[in-house]
Amino acid sequence: MMAKGAAELAQHDPAVAGRSAETMTALLTLLRTEISAAQRHGDIDSAADPERLAALLLAVVRGIEAVGKAGLAPEAVRSVADTALAALPGPRGGEEREGA
């Protein structure tokens, strides 16, 4: 609901734009926190920028939501998610992780 509201109303309604921005900021913060934790645990390259990775993952998640609602097969949606996770820089200096 937020995605549709933001897409259709944010350009014309400052309240919707503000709420959408707050929500996106909160989601980015949560993702950044989890990415930083994964870096501390050695699952993601510690040299990677958690802010950039958070933005990438948020864009992927929002895209998955959109194509899933548009009818993309669940197997294809899962493949997109798996590919995005595999593309995260591994703990050895940016190598892609296998089988994520």
Image (cartoon, rainbow, N blue to C red):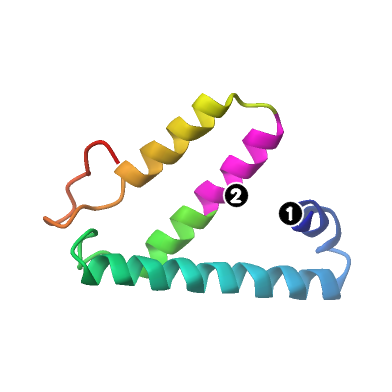
Q: Position of residue 53 (x, y in %)?
A: 38, 60
In the picture provided, is 39 more to the left or to the right than 75?
left
* Mark 1 residue type: Ala
Residue drawn at the location 52% of the way across and 56% of the way down: 58
Quadrant in which the N terminus is drawn: bottom right
The reply to whether dot 1 and dot 2 touch (C-beta < 8 Å) is yes
Q: Main structural element of the magenta stretch: helix, strand or loop? A: helix
Residue labelled with disc 1: 3
Where residue 18 sits, quadrant-wise, is: bottom right
The tag on residue 19 is: none
**How many residues crowd mark 1 within 10 Å: few (<14), some (14–19), many (20+)?**
few
Q: Position of residue 36 (x, y in %)?
A: 32, 71
The answer to if 65 sits in the magenta stretch is yes
Does residue 26 appear in this view? yes
Q: Secondary structure at mark 1?
A: helix
Residue 9 in the image: x percent, y percent?
A: 86, 60
Above/below status of 96 relative to 8: above
The answer to which of 41 and 96 lies nearer the viewer is: 41
Question: Which picture quadrant has residue 98?
Answer: top left
Along the line of sight, which residue is nearer the eye, 95 or 97?
97
Question: Could you classify mark 2 by the number of other residues whose Cα lies within 10 Å: few (under 14), some (14-19), or many (20 or more)?
Answer: few
Q: Which residues are magenta?
A: 59-70
- State the CA–CA distance, disc 1 to disc 2: 8 Å
The quarter of the displayed image where residue 19 is located: bottom right
Q: Is residue 49 visible?
A: no
Q: Residue at x 50, y 25 (%)?
A: 75
User: Which residue carries the number 2 mark?
Assistant: 62
